[in-house]
Amino acid sequence: MMHGILPVFPRICRGSYAPRPGEPTGKPRRSDRLGRHPAALRANHRAYSACALIQRKVGDGLFVYGLIQPPAWISAMIIDILSREHRNIERLLNVLEHELDIFDHAGRPDYEVIGSIIAYFEVYTELYHHRQEDLIFAKLRHRDPAAAAKMGDLAREHQKGSDRLHRVAHAVANVRAGGEILRENVDAVIRDFLAHERRHIMMEDRDFFPAAVKALTPQDWADIESTLSPHKDPLFSDATEARFDVLRAHIMDLEKEAEAERH
């Protein structure tokens, strides 16, 4: 008879221990101690951290141990984070394009804003956003090679994007230093970056994320979640960095102007 239950979550995985007929209670069998006892679970840190341990008190002091499957909302949470970051990247691309239009008409763009956009891509998009996507893509290659093949080599595409960003940074630095560089060459470098980034984001939103949600297992998502960096977005989160203050204000001003024009 069950005298009490101490649940952490409501769902129990298969394999919980129960005594055989006539077997003494109060101490699990050796095989169960190795596979399901908390000491064994703690020895496997990744499994223990990815799942929750529950205890059931059965009979005269026997505890039944089980693991909870990683909840389905983990995948939704991760995709939501990456999708929101895509929307923020699109905002930055719009600002960069706005400054480029000023440059193309022989005006003087805000180079501090442009420099901040380049810095954001270097310190956050490349170091955190792309690395998370690369990990998901590696899992997708394992679970559904055909779906992954349709998207090509995502990690290589990210590297190509990084190379284009460096060309943008180099072109802008030359202009600011008064170097000899044609305006049309600067325009071509930056517009190439803008076009590829927008196509890349569209492909990931349309093809990559849905394929990953369909193919990856709950444990895959738990593994990915365990690698999420505690580092917050330095521009669009509550952990903002002072070096992006001008860019943040510029984005808000441009979006207010665009909203006013629509009305």
Image (cartoon, rainbow, N blue to C red):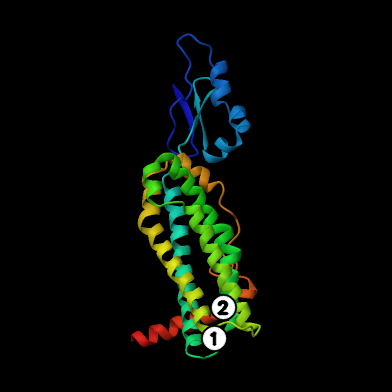
Count all numbered tags in the image, as a single digit.
2
Q: Is residue 258 above or below residue 159?
A: below
Which of marks 2 and 1 precedes in the sequence?
A: 1
Mark 1 belongs to which amino acid?
A: Pro
Residue at image mark 1: 109
Give the crowd class for mark 1: few <14, some 14-19, many >=20 residues within 10 Å.
Answer: some
Asked if the residue at tag 2 contacts the one at tag 1, i.e. Cβ–Cβ closer than 8 Å, the answer is yes
User: Residue farthest to the left?
Assistant: 263
Q: Residue at x 40, y 47 (%)?
A: 149
State the image coordinates of residue 199 (x, y, percent, origin top left): 40, 64
Q: Is residue 28 above or below residue 146?
A: above
Instruction: Tell me the tag on residue 120.
Output: none
**The C terminus - image quarter:** bottom left
Mark 2 belongs to which amino acid?
A: Ile
Q: Is residue 120 left or right of residue 82?
A: right
State the image coordinates of residue 210 (x, y, percent, origin top left): 36, 52
In front of the other: 98 or 63: 98
Q: Residue at x 47, y 90 (%)?
A: 105
Q: Residue at x 59, y 73 (%)?
A: 169
State the image coordinates of residue 202 (x, y, percent, origin top left): 38, 62
Q: Is residue 47 above or below residue 191?
A: above
Instruction: Tell me the tag on residue 114.
Output: 2
